[in-house]
Image (cartoon, helix red, strand yellow):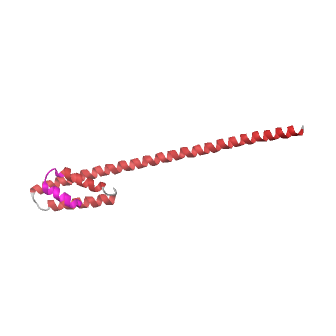
Amino acid sequence: MDVGKQIEDAIREGQRVQEAVQEITLKALTERQLDFAAMRKVTSEAIESIRQAAATQDPGLMEAARQALSGVGRALGEAGQAAKLSAEEAAASSQLVKAARAQLEAGVRAGAASGAVFARAAAGMLAGLADALENRHKR
């Protein structure tokens, strides 16, 4: 069932309209990729259903339409907050990855430097052993 039809049904039922429309809208938003285009599509469908209900001039439906509009607003607020938190988490994760990479690169550079020191020390020891063996052989 599409969003518009579900909202129309909620408005006609007249029970807990704000909460019902908020749930319908949030569900529709979370079942799709949460981006601007999806939010616009769901909002357009919801608003069109609400507009049609309000156009009837029936006082009961007008009040239900006002509650429905409030439900859509609340759902969009929650979805926006969720998108903001998701973006913040992605940014924090990106920063952690960058920090870990920097630490790894620093460790590799330190390891390479340590390796170079070790290689020089080993080369020095081997040269010393070679000299000692050569001198011993000459005697």
Residue 52, how many percent across, how many down? Answer: 16, 62
Quadrant containing the N terminus in the rendered view: bottom left
Residue 53 position, x and y percent, is 15, 60
User: Quadrant where the C terminus lies?
Assistant: top right
Q: How many marks?
A: 0
What secondary structure is the magenta-colored segment mainly?
helix
Q: Farthest left residue?
A: 59
Q: Tell me if residue 99 is in the magenta stretch.
A: no
Q: Where is residue 19 in the image (x, y as percent from the top left)?
A: 20, 50
Question: Which quadrant of the structure image shows residue 120?
Answer: top right
Q: In the image, is 7 to the left or to the right of 121?
A: left
Q: Which of 51 and 100 is in front in this view?
A: 100
Please indicate whether residue 112 sits to the left or right of residue 50 in the image: right
Residue at 27%, 54% in the rendered image:
27
Q: Quadrant of residue 124?
A: top right
Q: Residue at x 48, y 47 (%)?
A: 97
The residue sitting at 25% across, 61% down in the picture is 44
Q: Which residue is drawn at 26% across and 58% down?
A: 43
Q: Which of 84 and 107 is in front in this view?
A: 107
Provide the residue span drawn in magenta. 1-17
Measuring from the top left, give residue 98's x and y in whole percent. Answer: 50, 47
Please tell me in which quadrant of the rendered image residue 119 appears. top right
